[in-house]
Image: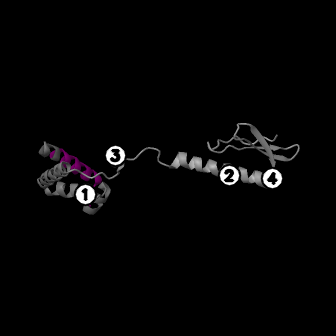
Amino acid sequence: MAERPKRRKYKDNPYTLNYIEEKNIYMVSFKDVRGKLQKIEVSEEIYKTFDRFELDDLSEMNEYDNHIEHSEIYENSLESRVKDKPIGLEDEIIKRSEFAELKKAIDMLPEIQRRRIKKYYFDDKTQQQIADEENVDIRAIQYTLNIALKKLKEILK
């Protein structure tokens, strides 16, 4: 008998395919209703149809195993999977009050520090871009930002 690749079969598929290479015989075997093993010689066309059926079943089993949700989905499990979770009212109030405090603290900085902080953190400019705009050395920008951050920490304590 020619060696066929071993595949898993769907539980409801009772057929086993065999090919006897020496005699060029295609066989389909299965257990009948009495549990007796039956072996039937079939044409190559029918054998290939059964083989295609097995491959289609295997494809569906793989699709089920790899791509279909297997757990029950409830409202609380869906909520835990949400990417952009809604912000609670308390969290929104805290966030806004912290932002307002930060804005006040930034407004308390000297004009140069305030301007450079806004450009760097809010306008997403690099230190080199700010230095080029203001015609100063990048070290001056770095120094100003460091001093401004230290002052902000002191103010916000």
Residue 148 inside the magenta-drawn segment:
yes
Q: Which quadrant of the figure contains the C terminus?
A: top left
The residue beneath circle 2 is 53
Nearer mark to the viewer, of 4 and 1: 4
Q: Please tell me whether mark 4 sits on a helix, a strand or a loop.
A: helix
Q: Amino acid at mark 1?
A: Phe
Left or right, 157 with respect to 1, comes to left
Spatial CA span between label 3 and label 2: 40 Å
The reply to whether the C-beta atoms of the residues labelled 2 and 1 are less than 8 Å apart is no
The residue beneath circle 3 is 80
Crowding near pointer 1: few (<14 within 10 Å), some, many (20+)? few
Residue 65, picture quadrant = top right
Nearer mark to the viewer, of 1 and 3: 3
Crowding near pointer 2: few (<14 within 10 Å), some, many (20+)? few
Q: Amino acid at mark 2?
A: Phe
The reply to whether the C-beta atoms of the residues labelled 1 and 3 are less than 8 Å apart is no
Counting residues from the N terminus, which is met first, the one under dot 2 or under dot 1? 2
The one nearer the camera, 70 or 119, is: 70
The residue beneath circle 4 is 44
